Image (cartoon, helix red, strand yellow):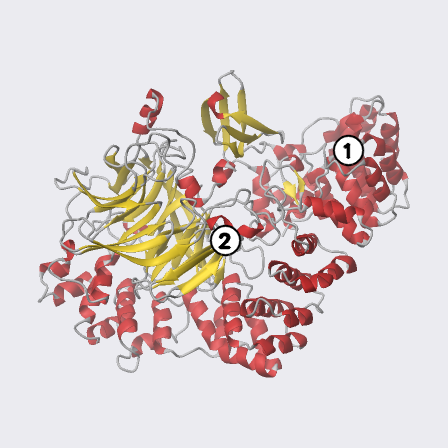
Amino acid sequence: MRFNSITLLTMLLTLAGQNSLVSAQTENQVTESPRSTDPRIQIELFAESPQVVTPTGINVDECGRVWAIESNTHFPPEGYQRADSDRILVMSDTDGDGKADQIVRFADGLTYTMSVAVKPTCLKYLEGDADKGKICRSNQVFVATRNEVFLMTDDDGDLKADRKQSLLKVETPGSYPHNGLAGFAFDAAGWMYIGFGENLGAEYTITGADGTAYSGGGEGGNVYRCRPDGTELKLWATGFWNPHASCVDAFGHLFTVDNDPDSRPPCRLLHIIQGGDYGYRFRNGRKGLHPFTSWDGELPGTLPMVAGTGEAPSGILAYESDGLPKEYIGNLLVTSWGDHRIDRFKLKPKGATFTATRTPLIEGGENFRPVGIATAPDGSLYCTDWVLRDYKLHGKGRIWRISRKGQKSISPEKTIAIQQPETYLAQVQKSLDSAHLPTRRLAAWLIGTEGGKTLRNIVNNQEQPLRTRYESMMYLADNYNSTDVPVINARRATKQGGPYTPLDTEVMKYDKKNLAVNRIIALLQARDGSDPSYLLNSLQGLIPTIRELGSTRSEMAGKLLNQVVDVHDPFIDSELIRLISRTFQEADFKKTLAYSDALSPRLRLLIILAARRHNPQAVDVIKVALSNPEPELQRALVQWIAEENLVELKPAVLKIMNSRELDPQLFDAVLAAVQLLEGEQRSRNDEALGIEFASKILKNEQYSRNARARALSVIPPQHPQLTAEILKSFLQSGHQPSVLAAIRVLQLAPRKPLLGELRELIADQSESELIRTEALVALAAGIPLEQSHDASKALLLATLKDPQPAVRAEALRALRALKEEPGVSETLSKLQSGSEPEFADLATLAAGKNMPALKYEDVATGGDPGAGRRIFFHPNSVRCSQCHTVHHQGGQVGPDLSVVARAMDRKKLAQSILHPSAEIAPQFTVWTFLMESGKVINGLILGEANKDNLTVGTVDGKVLTIKRNQIEEQIPQKASLMPEKLSERLTKQELRDLIAYLQTLK
C-alpha cells in the first residue's frame, strides 16, 4: 500500500511504532512547532502528552471548552498501559495563559472512537430542551465509534456523562478501527450527517433509532442523514473510500474529505448532494483502477471532486467566525495527516458545484500530524495532532490553538441567552449580524420564538447582509409556511435575473413554486456564478416534463430535456437521474428507450442510469437499450449487467465483444464484465487489467480477431504468455489491429527473434503508414539487443529516402541509437544542413545535440496525435512511457495519463512539460533518501511493501524496495521527478505532436 494513498483514517492513524519509547532524535522532532504561512496568524501549543495521547476527533463548545478523543484502542502495542479504552477529555484554560490547566474525563469505556460533537445550542432550542440560564451546564455530546453513534448526557453539570443513548448502530463482521462511522456535520434545518467508510467490503446493516435500516457491503463508503435523535435515517450519497470528516457551510452546502485508493490519487474534497454517486466501489478492488470505478467523475453518472487535497485529509470545517482575518470567512480548512499541513480552500461556484484553490495555512515537519479541527467561540481554531507516523499507539499527542497573532486565549463571552433570558430582543437582533455562525444561528432562533414578522422583514430587506438574511430565512422555512409569513420582496428579487444567491435558493423552496422549463434551460445555459443549490433545486420544475416523456413519449418533452443535458454538468446529470428514477414507472423506461427519435445519446444514457437506480434487476429494460450501438451507452449497460450479476445477459455482452472494433474503455468494461459473470474475481494486483482472463481470450478463437487484438493490448508486454511464437502469429495475421497490437507490445518489450519480422513490415511500402511507423518504433527498441546492427542500419538509412514523410521521420528517430555507427554520422550531418527544417532538427537530435528552449507560444496549436503517441512510447525520445502508463501500457512511477485531458487543457499539458516543477501535486513529491550505506536514492514513494519496506520509483522508471531501518534521512525535494529542459530533447513539431496526443486522452 502506498504511503501517500492509505485510506483516509489509515493515514490519519498510521503506521508503525511499537511503544511510547522514542529516541532522543525523535523527542527533538516532536518538540518542533508547526508554523503559519500567514504572518497574521499564530499556532500555539494548548496541550500535550501526558495530558492527552494519540488524539483524534475534537470539538469546542459554546463555553470555550475543548472536547477531545484520546484513542487507546487503535492497535495498542504489547504492554500498552495508558488505558484499556478510548476516552473523551474536556479541557479548559481557566487562567487565560493559552494552556489547558483543567482536564476532566467525560467518558471512557469506548472502542475505536472517531468523532465527537457537542450538541449545538440552536439544536437545544429546536428540540425544546435548553435551559437558558444553564447552557454551560447542559452538556449533550454526540460520539461516533466505529459501529455506533451515541448521545451522551451530563445531567448535573460535573462534565461527566451520566447517560448514553444509542442513535445509530451498525451490525457487521467488519472490525477495522477506522473505516466505519465518523464525521458529524449539522445544517441549519437541524439535520445531522455522518459518514461510513468502505468497511473492507464486509456486509453491514445500519439502523436508526426508529428502526429505519440500510444494508449493503462492497459498494464503498456512504454518507447518511438523520435527525439528531437518530430517526429518519436516509442514505444521502455513495461512492466514497472513507468519508471520515464532513462539514456544512453557512449556506447549507455539504462537503466531505475522502482518502484515495492505493493507486488513484489525489485524496478528494467533495461537494455532497442528495443521491450523489462519487464513483468508488470497494468490490472492484482497493487500487481504484477497475474500469467500473470512477474517482473524478470519469464515468457517466458519477461526480467529480471540488479539488485534490493533501494526503490523508482527516478533518474539515467551514470557517464562519471573526477570530481570523475577514477573508477567511467562507473558506474550508482541511487537515492533511500525511503532508503535515492544514490547507485553506477558497470556494468558487462552477455550474452546479464548486471548484477551489488550495493554499497551505499551517505547515509542520514529519511529526506534525493534524487530525481533527474545530472552531472556538472566540474564532480561534483547535486541532488534534497524532504526532508520530506510527500506526500503533505510541503515547504521544498534542492539541494546538490557531489564532490571530497576539490574541490571547480568553473565556468566551457568555451567549446572549445566558445574559438576559427575558429582555434580549435588541441584543439578539444585533447578534444576528455576528460573523460567528453559532451566535448568528442562535440569534435567529431566539428572534423566531417571538414571532415571524421580524425575521420576515430582515429577509425582505436587501440592505441586510446575506448571511443574516439566510439565517432568518432558514428559521422561517423550518417553522412557518409562505402563506402565513410571505417573503414577497425576496421573492421578487429572485425574478430579476441571476446570478442567484443561497437566499434565493431557500426562498424558492419556501414558496414551493417551480420555474418554467424554458426558464430552467436559460438558467442552466448561463449558470456560472449562481448558487449551485439554486440550479439543482430548479430542476424540480422538470418533473412534469419528465412525467410527460415517460407516459406519452412526447417529442417536445424529449427535446426540452435534451437541452437540459446539453449543458454537460455532471451535478445536473446526477439530479436529473435521481428525478427520472423517482418519476418514471418501470414500463416508462422500456417504452421511452424504444422510442429513439427525440432522445439525444446523452439523455438516453441518463435514462439508462436512472432505470438501473429504479430497479437494478430490470432485464427487459436492458434488452431494449442494448439495441443502441453508442459505445458509452453500451459501456453503462455492460457495467449494469456485470455488477448486478445478470448472468442470463452474458451472451449479449459477448456479442458486443465479438461484433465490433471496440474502443479501449468499452473493451475494458466488457472484459471486466465477462470475468465477473463467469465468477472469476480479480486479485488486488489484477483489478485494472483482468490479465489472466485477457490471456484466455488471446488463445481462444471463439472470440473475434478484434477482441483478441484488444486482449493483447491490455496484457503487460513482459507477460510470460506473450511468447515470440504468439506475437509472430499476430504480426503475420494480415489483420491490422492484430499486427498493430503485437508491434506495440514489442515497443515496450522487444524480442530479438522478431526483429526480422519488423524489418519486413518497414520495408514493405505497400503496408500502411501506421504499421510502418509503429514498426520503426519497435525496431528502435530492439536495436540494443542486436549483436550486429548492419541489417537495421541499412534499412534505416534506405528508409530516409521513403516517399512518406512520417516514415522518414521515424527512421531518423530510430537512428539516434546508431549515431556512432559508420556511415550514420555523415548522413546526419548532411540532413542537418538540408532544406527541410523539421528533418534538419530531427537529424540534429539524432546526432546527440539539443534544441533551443521552447515557450508555450511555440506549441500553442497544431500537432499530429498519431505521431505524438509514437514519441510518447519511443525509446530514443523523451521516454514518457518509462514512467507513465496510458491504457495499461507503460511504467508505474508517474501518474497514469490515460484520462489526463479530462483535467488539463492544452496550455496546462504544455506547461507540465516545459516547466515540470512549477506545480507538483503532493502525492508526487520527490524524496531524497540518504541511506546508512552512503547511497543516495531519489524517487517517488509508490507504496509500502510492508511495515518494514518502502517501494520507491526512480527517474529512470525503476521500482526499488528499500528498508526503512536503513534510511538515515528522508528529505522532500521541490523539483519534479520529471527532468527539466525536457523540451530541448524535442523538435518544435515533436512537442506539438506530443501535446496533441495527450489532448486525446479523455
Which residue shows up at 70% across the image and 27% down it? 849
Which residue shows up at 63% across the image and 39% down it? 884
Q: Is residue 667 visible?
A: yes
**Tag 2: residue type?**
Gly
> Percent position (x, y) of residue 604?
62, 70
Residue underneath mark 2: 220
> Percent position (x, y) of residue 214?
44, 62
Q: How many marks?
A: 2
Which element is circle 2 on? loop
Which element is circle 1 on? loop
Residue underneath mark 1: 750
Left or right, 456 with reference to 749: left
Which residue shows up at 36% across the image and 49% down it? 316
Neighbours of disc 1 within 10 Å: few (<14), some (14-19), many (20+): many
> Percent position (x, y) of residue 508?
37, 74
Q: Nearer the viewer, mark 2 or mark 1?
A: 2
Marks 2/1: CA–CA distance: 40 Å
> Percent position (x, y) of residue 951?
55, 31
631 relative to 930, above or below = below
Q: Is residue 835 visible?
A: no
Looking at the picture, tell me which residue is in the foreground, 278 or 722. Answer: 722
325 relative to 852, above or below = below
**Tag 1: residue type?**
Pro
Left or right, 858 with reference to 874: left
Mark closest to the chain's N terminus, 2 or 1: 2
